[in-house]
Amino acid sequence: FGWTTKPSTAAPVAYTEYSVDGEPRGGVMELTAEFGPMPPCWTVYVLVDDCAGTVARAASLGGRACHGPFEAPGVGHIAVMNDPQGAMFNI
């Protein structure tokens, strides 16, 4: 795919970034016990203006935060979420 990899300094866990032409396009990390019952998966990130507010709104609609929100230095706040049917996504 023409990807390059480097260890991320933004994540609070060991995380490897995948880049194309120097632009981050993805990453991979080990799922540890702190992530709860999250199965291995590929997932997407959705950019939101207010991470904590979006987590609260999602919870009011039947979703839940599996992990976070937490601060990823240089990136912002991130939360790993489940929608009401259990599908995973990140904000």
Image (cartoon, rainbow, N blue to C red):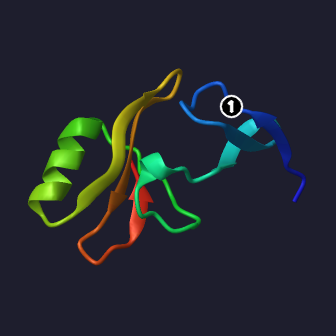
Q: Which residue is mark 1?
A: 8
Give the side of residue 80 with respect to residue 26, left or right: left
Describe residue 39's horizontal placement relative to residue 81 as left or right.
right
In depth, the one of 31 and 21 nearer the eye is 31
Q: Quadrant of the N terminus?
A: bottom right
> Up-down: is 69 above or below 66?
above
Residue 53 is situated, as x and y percent measured from the top left of the image, at: 18, 40
Q: Quadrant of residue 64?
A: bottom left
41 is higher (above) or lower (below) than 6: below
Is 14 or 16 nearer to us in this picture? 14
User: Measuring 85% from the left and 49% from the top, which residue is drawn there?
Assistant: 3
User: Residue 90 placed where, x, y %?
Assistant: 42, 52
Where is residue 46? Give x, y as percent: 42, 51
Q: Tell me which residue sits at (15%, 67%) in the image.
A: 62
Front-most of residues 12 and 76 = 12
Q: Residues within 10 Å of mark 1 (few under 14, many from 20)?
A: some
- Which image quadrant is residue 7 in? top right
Determine the residue located farthest toward the left in the rendered image. Answer: 60
Q: Label 1 is placed on what type of residue? A: Ser
The secondary structure type at the circle numbered 1 is: loop
Q: Nearer the viewer, residue 73 or 40?
A: 40
Q: Residue at x 29, y 38 (%)?
A: 51
- The residue sitting at 19% across, 56% down in the picture is 58
In the rendering, at what x and y percent does residue 52 appear?
A: 23, 37
Tell which residue pokes out farthest to the top in this image: 74
